[in-house]
Every structure is written in structure tokens, then in C-alpha cells.
Image: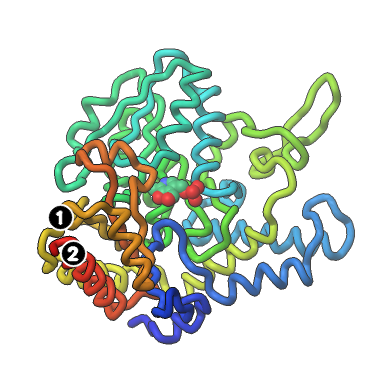
Amino acid sequence: MAIDIEKIRQDFPILKKEIYGKHLVYLDNAATTQKPRCVVDTIVNGYYDCNANIHRGVHFLSQQATEAHESARKTVQQFIHAQHAHEIIFTRGTTEAINLVAHSFGISQCNDGDEIIISQMEHHSNIVPWQLLQQIRNIRLRVLPFDKKGVLQIDQLENLINEKTKLIAIAHVSNTLGSINPVKQIVQIAHSHNIPVLVDGAQSTPHTPIDVQDLDVDFFAFSGHKIYGPTGIGVLYGKEKWLEAIPPYQGGGEMIQKVSFEKTTFNELPFKFEAGTPDYIGSTALATALNYVSEIGIDNIAHYEHELLQYATNKLSQIEGIRFIGESEHKSGLISFLVGNIHPYDMGTILDKLGIAVRTGHHCAEPVMKAFDIEGTVRASFALYNTTEEIDILAAGIERVAKMFRR
Ligand code: PLP
């Protein structure tokens, strides 16, 4: 089914905005996506019409809000094809989900001298939580490298694995290079050594179908705001056996069964990991976003965004002096680039004056910058509402900046 792009764009009021008198061309979707009207309506209606703290109330509104929150959990379960709804833990986002695993898995499953494998293309949020764990357990981080094109060197994975390896934590899609990593293959290799795998799905979930059972991942994290949902809500999926095996991350209300000053017993899954009042409005709006995506069809979105990527790659490669950072054959819809010696901030700032929103800098992936010996890149990242016309505007904008600097 083809995507009805005009109809979709109508759903996102912000796309009509003008910036410095120019039509907004929003190409910063890897950082966060814009929100369709239905998601914003869910938030507004939630507060106006269905707001009461969940789980503990006997009154009507509390039960209605509880029902909405728990139904959102089921929507997430179906969206990523988890076996059980209680394997879905609501978090603030990918970052909090990874921190949860680093802490709870780390302190319960790792001893001094144990090893965790990550990759060279991780976002800081899949590096720093493991370094924080190092303050509690003296673990060693091993790093799987990528090659010149930004392709993970999977053939080196076996060399990094040994009897001390406790977990492999890896991005599904790099937010900087766009590379799609072969997580299914990584999981197969890891499981053949009885090592669990955490997948950072922040950049894959919005763009490609996710089936956690088919991938056979042990943990999977994603953020609501990158998939047309609200900020401040995200998901940690964990296989039941792992969520049962690891201790709570935070203490407080909701996550307990019984509390006394002598001893506390913990609640069952998923509540054991959801201390405090959850973002029940956010979870409900996330469910609206996921339903919105499902209605259009995530396969259709993947197909459309792939066409955009091909169009953009062809178009931009005609620009004199352009250099792409990340040239994997298996790429998601984003392009990181540099033109000649133009500093990414200069490029980004001038593009902004033309109404074009791109991201510049290290994209929270400093080790990737180090590997290419650069300070940063310009990154254009696509979503389902972008068009080839917008890519033409981007290309013309880059040409204009390049000309200014050639003079
Ligand atoms: N992982 C990847 C690959 C990302 O791109 C990002 C955000 O850009 C994150 C993790 C962190 O996501 P959040 O800030 O929503 O927690």
C-alpha cells in the first residue's frame, strides 16, 4: 500500500509552521519526531477527562485511568510482539530502560572481573550506564568495532566472548551512521554461549517492524518520543525469566507488596519495576502513537522511508565535496555528512536560517566521531511525513552553504 503523504502531513500541525519566513523542513527525526493530532488529543483529553492516580483507587476515574494505562501496556506488547503484557515495563525512555538493566542485571548477575560487550557505535546511553556499574562491580567493557563504512565487524564477536562475558548490549540501528545491525545473528551467537542480549531499539522501533520473540532478544528498549509519541515515556521489554531474576531498580510506591520497617516484599511483574506514580497519560498517548503507526503500517513506513533514503543519497552525492559518514548497505533513513572543511555547526546554522532543521555535533556518540577523527557531522534524519521535495530543498540549501564557503 502506498503512503498517502498529503493526508499524513495534515495529521501533524507543526509541519505547517514557518521558520524565518520559510516553510519548516523538519529533518531531525532521529532526535525526536513530531506528534500527530491524535497523540496530542489523547494527552489533552487524558488530563481534561480521565485524570486520577492509577492502581490504588476504588473510584470511577481511577479505574478508568488504570484501564487506559494497562491497555496501553497491551498495545505495546502487541506492537513489539512480546509474549506477555507483564514483560513490558514503562520507563522514561530508552536511557532509563538501559540504566535499569545496567543496575538491576549488573548488581545481581555480574561479579568483579566479568565482562559486558557493547559496540563502537553505541549512543552514550548504552555506554555510560555500564561505566556507572563499574563503580559498583569491577566489570570490563569490551567493544565490538565497525569498519570504514560503519558496518559492525561481526566476525570479531566470537573473539570478544569468553566465560566472563555476562551480557551483550547493542544498538539495533546507529543514530549516527544509520547502520542496521544484524541483531538476530548477534543474539544467535550470544545464546550459543548462554549470554543474554540487550538491544537498544531507540532508532529501529519507529522505522521497522519489531518482533522481540522472533529476534529472541532478552531485553529491548525504545523511546516514545522517537515514534510520534510523547516525551518522558518509553519501554523496557524483558523476557519474563530475566525480569523475575533481577531485583527492582527503584524503591517506592506501587512496586511493593508489603512494607514494614523490618522487611519489604516486592510486587509482581511488571509493577516491581515501576516505582512511584507512572506516566499514565504518557503511556496512553504512546499507545495512540503506536496505533497510528500500525494503521499506516510499519512495513509501509519502512518501505517509504527507504525510498526517501535512496533519493536523498543520490541527490546529496551530487554535491561537490560531500562526504558521507556511515555507508553501510543496510541503512535506516538517516544521512550523516560533511562538506569540504565546512564546520557542521556552520552548515546547521545556515540551513536553519533556510527553515531546514538538521542536527549537528557528535550526536551523543563521541566514540564514532573518534573513529572517523572528526568533531561532528550534520545529520538529516527522515520520518514518514518527509517528502522528496523536502530533500530537494535540503540539497539546494547545502549547495548554497557550500558556495558561500567556496567563495
Ligand atoms: N539510543 C539511541 C541509539 C538513540 O539514538 C537515543 C537518542 O537519540 C537514545 C538511545 C536515548 O534515547 P532517549 O534520550 O529517548 O532516552
Callout 2 secondary element = helix
- Pointer 2 residue Cβ closer than 8 Å to ligand 1: no
Q: How crowded is mark 1: few (under 14 residues within 10 Å), some or many (20 or more)?
A: few
Q: Residues within 10 Å of mark 2 (few under 14, many from 20)?
A: many
Residue sitting at x 64%, y 44%: 270
Residue that lies at the very extreme toward the front in this rendered image: 407
Q: State yes or no: discs 2 and 1 in contact (Cβ < 8 Å).
A: yes
Residue sitting at x 32%, y 54%: 345
Judge by depth and name the residue closer to the eye, 397 or 51: 397
The amino acid pointed to by label 2 is Ala
* Distance CA(mark 2)–CA(mark 1): 8 Å
The amino acid pointed to by label 1 is Gly
Could you say where residue 134 lies in the image, as x and y percent from the top left? 46, 21
Residue sitting at x 44%, y 81%: 9
The mark found on residue 402 in the picture is 2
Residue that lies at the very extreme toward the right in this rendered image: 59
Horizontally, residue 289 falls left or right of residue 189, namely: right
Q: Is residue 328 visible?
A: no
Horizontally, residue 84 falls left or right of residue 339, namely: right
Callout 1 secondary element = loop
Could you say where residue 237 lies in the image, as x and y percent from the top left? 52, 46
Question: Residue 387 lies in what quarter of the image?
Answer: bottom left
Question: Residue 2 lies in what quarter of the image?
Answer: bottom left
Judge by depth and name the residue closer to the eye, 1 or 391: 391
Judge by depth and name the residue closer to the eye, 334 or 60: 334
Could you say where residue 71 lies in the image, as x and y percent from the top left? 65, 62
Q: Quadrant of the N terminus?
A: bottom left
Residue sitting at x 41%, y 75%: 24
The mark found on residue 340 in the picture is 1
